[in-house]
Amino acid sequence: MSLIVQKFGGTSMGSIERIKQVAGRVIKEKNEGNDVVVVVSAMSGETNRLLDLAVKMGGKQDDMETDLIISSGEQISSGLLSLALKNEGYDAVPMLGHQVRITTDESYGKARISSIDSENIRRMLKSGKIVVIAGFQGIDSNGFITTLGRGGSDTTAVAVAAAVKADRCDIYTDVDGVYTADPNIVQDARRLDVVYFDEMIEMSSLGAKVLQIRSVEFAMKYGVNLFVKSTFVDGNGTQIKFIGEEESMEELQVSSVACDKDEAKISIRGIPDRPGIAAKIFSKISSANIVVDMIIQNISIEGHTDLTFTVSKKDLKKALEITEELAKELDAKEVLSDDKIAKVSVIGVGMRNHYGTASTMFDVLAKENINIMMISTSEIKISCVIDAKYAELAARILHDAFNLGRQN
Ligand code: ADP
Ligand code: ASP
Ligand code: MG
């Protein structure tokens, strides 16, 4: 007998019919003699609908009221799935974040899990129940509801799997695994049997929303046996695992392409070029809980320089306010912003052993006349910021150029 955590996303929970189908997947696992813990997302579109209501009432992403409102979609899903299981004659129990005791910090809208009390789950499993947990939500140390950031049910599932020491954590979604690129953008993208944690971390942080990045970090830290599978078609899906010694030498130069349209860039032009200016700007931005991604600074001309950086679109307004105030204080010439950008990236652990990846990437973009605004690299990825209107085209031509398609 194994202990399995299954997570079902918004599309999988999208209607009464689909929830019945999900119940079928849960029952199959239970009938094989396993203990099953299920984590569910809100029905597709529901979190956006709730967020919209909160915003219309003046709520901001980091208000505690907004979290209370947007967490409710998962509550409904857990109740519905529990009912569906009971209708089929199985003993199930729906549980909310605070009933499990998923505790988090107080960063409303993007809270981090600090602990999970596995005792409540274990007690329910011992009495033969299928536990159906509402994903995406927790409580802070004062007992207020928090949410874990968009896509956060993945993180609930992996964190629960780590806490109960599950034998496997299956993330069920609307695609049958992790692909060489978003299959909804690149038609001949290929499903991968295995993706290494190092690559998955990069993919998730660079726009492949199939797994929320924090779920991958959790799985890596606690060694969770993690799979991505389809709710709608049978198959083994994709396993996310640690790279083995024997595998590292033969890897492809590039194993996937990712695309992120969720960022915006801010430029401060004509800032006096003296020590401490960058520190001042970025410490103000980070103290507003805003994560900065790429940064470039131009060479100084006559004692002045330009600084450009990217933040997520949802943080743009706040970041702009801070930057404009600072620009005045620093006597900078002007502040510009652009939210019509996209970041395209190529990723692969094989890049460690190959050269020429960057030049191929730049060449391919140049041939299509796509201008590169910013570049960033790590050992296993290269990212370019380009005009948003070329995002899909860039993903396709890069996918082709690195021979990632099905026909190869
Ligand atoms: P869920 O609602 O089940 O959590 P998501 O919409 O969050 O599902 O994630 C699944 C989606 O991720 C897919 O429909 C696909 O469009 C997108 N995606 C982006 N990049 C990839 C990739 N490399 N492989 C698979 N899916 C990807
Ligand atoms: N319902 C939440 C969202 O839409 C969490 C999730 O689906 O993982 O972001
Ligand atoms: Mg998701």
Image: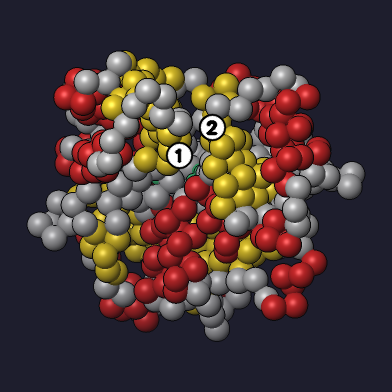
Pick whichever, 33 or 207, lies toward us: 207
Query: Alpha carbon of mark 2 to alpha carbon of mark 1: how far?
Result: 8 Å
Q: Nearer the viewer, residue 196 or 158?
A: 196
Which mark, residue 348?
none
Position of residue 249 relative to residue 329, above or below, is below
Residue 177, image x and y in percent?
Answer: 66, 53
Q: Quadrant of the N terminus?
A: bottom right
- Which residue is label 2 attached to? 374
Left or right of residue 355, residue 240 in this image:
left
Q: Earlier in the sequence, mark 2 or mark 1?
A: 1
Location of mark 1 (residue): 294
Q: Quadrant of residue 311?
A: top left
Please state if 38 lies on the left or on the right of 279 as rendered.
right
Q: Do the residues bearing badges 2 and 1 touch, measured as CB atoms within 8 Å? A: yes
Residue at x 10%, y 57% (from the top left corner): 142
- Asked if disc 2 is less than 8 Å from ligand 1, the answer is no
Q: Give the residue type at disc 1.
A: Met
